[in-house]
Image: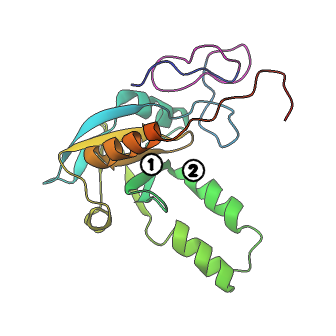
Amino acid sequence: MCGPVAGWSGEPAGIGGFLPARGPSRRAAGTGLKGDGAIFFGAEPVAFDAKKTRLSVPSAFRAVLAQGGDQDVVVRPSNHSPCIDVWPKAVFQAEVERRTRDLDPFSEEFDTITDGLTVQAYDTRVDADGRIALPKLLLAEVPLDASAVIVGRRSFFQIWSAPAWAERQAAAKSQPQPRPAPEGASA
């Protein structure tokens, strides 16, 4: 795991890969899109078994999945990074619904948006041993080697090849980092 991350109140994060729910309670209430519970954060190296096309999800990330009630996930290639997005299934379905709710399902815009969101998405499940099997078609598009890194991204997490993640981190370190506005300051 990465170092401590501050919660919304500026207090240290909870233990185990998720931040505490808003308010005084430190007990996470569930994974949500509005910051109303546990979120995925941090980065953990994992081994990828290319022969069986599976990897173990770190326990901290499994704990966040458990907050949502089951171990069903959707895996898909990221739209903008060389990695695999892993979404809790219910959260992914809610996000797709949010993005397509007001679109005509017979329109070009609907097709374009769903092409990017759902066409290359696959249902899978975290098994009893905490592993995810990745579809070979997905791995053909986003190859992994024996070393991978799982990266928390709030309501979902990503699976990166270790070299691609190291390259991303090196590029990020070379970029100037924005300074947060002082608390109480208006923009």
- Asked whether, in this view, residue 84 is left or right of residue 163, the answer is right
* First of labels 2, 1 by sequence position: 1
Report the residue marked by disc 1.
72
The residue tagged with tag 1: helix, strand or loop?
Answer: strand
Is residue 16 within the magenta segment? yes
Q: Residue 91 placed where, x, y %?
A: 58, 49
Q: Which residue range is magenta in the image? A: 9-26
Task: Inspect this view and state whether residue 127 appears.
Answer: no
Report the residue marked by disc 2.
90
Tell me: residue 88, above or below residue 129.
Answer: below
Q: Residue 136 placed where, x, y %?
A: 25, 64
Say how the picture is coloured: rainbow
Cα distance in 3D space between marks 2 and 1: 8 Å
Q: Residue furthest right?
A: 186
- Asked whether, in this view, residue 147 is left or right of residue 51, the answer is right
The quarter of the image holding the C terminus is: top right
Residue at 39% from the left image edge and 40% from the top image edge: 169
The secondary structure making up most of the magenta span is: loop
Residue at 53% from the left image edge and 38% from the top image edge: 69
Q: Which quadrant of the view contains residue 97? A: bottom right
Task: Inspect this view and state whether residue 107 appears.
Answer: yes
Labels 2 and 1 touching (C-beta < 8 A): yes
